[in-house]
Amino acid sequence: MLKENLSSPQDIKEFLRPLLFGVAEADLEKLAKAAVVQLLAANTTICHEGERGNAVYAIAEGQVDILKRMDAQNERLLGQRGPGSFFGEMAILQDGTRTATVRTAERTLLLKIDRKSFLAVLNHSPSLAIRLLVPLADRLREADHKAITELRQANQELTQALHQLEQMDQAKSAFIQVSAHELRTPVAALSGYAQMMASNPTVQATPQLQALTTGILTTTERLQRIFNNILDVSKIMSGEIQIHQTPWSIAVILKRIVEAFSQALAARQLSWQQEGIAELPPYPGDSQLLYKALYHLVNNAIKYTPDGGTIRVRGELVTDPQLGESLELAIEDSGVGIAKENLELIFEKFYHIGEIAFHSSGTTKFKGGGAGLGLTIARGIVEAHGGRIWAESPGYDEESCPGSRFIIRLPLGE
């Protein structure tokens, strides 16, 4: 069909007649007189998503693409319309904005009927409403079927990808666990030989040899801590962590932790405070694992608190809506804090806050190095005890140091 074949209202009326079968002759004439013929080149945008609907279009020749904007650069093809199809009526019927962009896929001949003329006929023509609603219903069924098909396909692809990721994660965990075991053995031997050297009278009488031996011992101890952390994470990931329940005093566990960090606290001039710990009842948990969890949380507080800051541990009994009667421990610091968007991410493996000094000689120095496993281990241990752990902070700021707060809740049971 050429543009010349729609050069008069009579031609347009005859074109619309089969498309709007049953519409009164007078209404057909009104629509035909209001229609404007447009011949558009390929890749011409007819209407934009989000703009107010001001016209209804009928395709006489050619084809258009219906597109949905996904982001600033990408669009998704929802469907195509060919000769005899209408588009743009939904925005007018709903008195709203257009939900998609329409663009010509090839040279296209259109009839454009303005909003006012279209509504004037629609208001007193049930036949026109029916003729428009039938294809609309067909398009909705088509869109629904397409969406279900795509969703089913996406679910299958997601399930397959998840299965592959699980296999990769299992392989990675096995590799890490085996590697840590294999590396820990020679490091343990190296540490043993270094200890023997350190007790040798010749080494003790030679300052240079003594310094070298001390350096070897310090390095091997750090490697052993890293390997142990890796193995702990591996057990948590594989669900192999075992709890040996025995009533233990939290105060005793914290005393051991303070002793372990006494030199770091003194060197950094960090103030240690405890509140309510002595009043806590014995907790029926695994003392070694609880020691590890609290050790990592205190180490984290030390690492992110500037020299001269404060670390405070509070203890109390609370009623948790999920756990019931529980023992709560809160480890607070006056450190750099945590950005709100990172409050969950910090418990993920290998995650760090801010720029870490990876070449730091110790994990207790301000923003010192580390593998980023401590909080992951702490969470795994707490959850293995049936408890909950989370972090709170106003935000991250190295100047004002708003601090952070890690809360542990452990159920007391019956």
Image: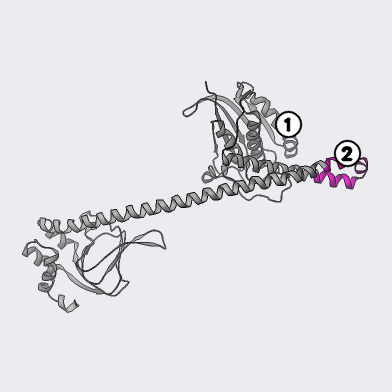
Does 198 appear in magenta?
yes
Which amino acid is tagged 2?
A: Ser
**Among the 4 quarters of the image, the one containing residue 200:** top right
Residue 375, compared with residue 287, is above or below; it is below
Q: Nearer the viewer, residue 192 or 140?
A: 192
Q: Which residues are magenta?
A: 193-216
**Residues under labels 2 and 1: Cα distance?**
25 Å
Q: Nearer the viewer, residue 282 or 182?
A: 182
> From the viewer's perspective, is 146 left or right of 340?
left
Majority secondary structure of magenta residues: helix
Does 299 appear in magenta?
no
Q: Which residue is mark 1?
A: 259
Q: In which quadrant of the rendered image does the N terminus lie?
A: bottom left
x%, y% of residue 145? 29, 54
Q: Mark 2 or 1 closer to N-term?
A: 2
Residue 393, compared with residue 167, is above or below; it is above
x%, y% of residue 3? 19, 77
Q: Which residue is mark 2?
A: 199
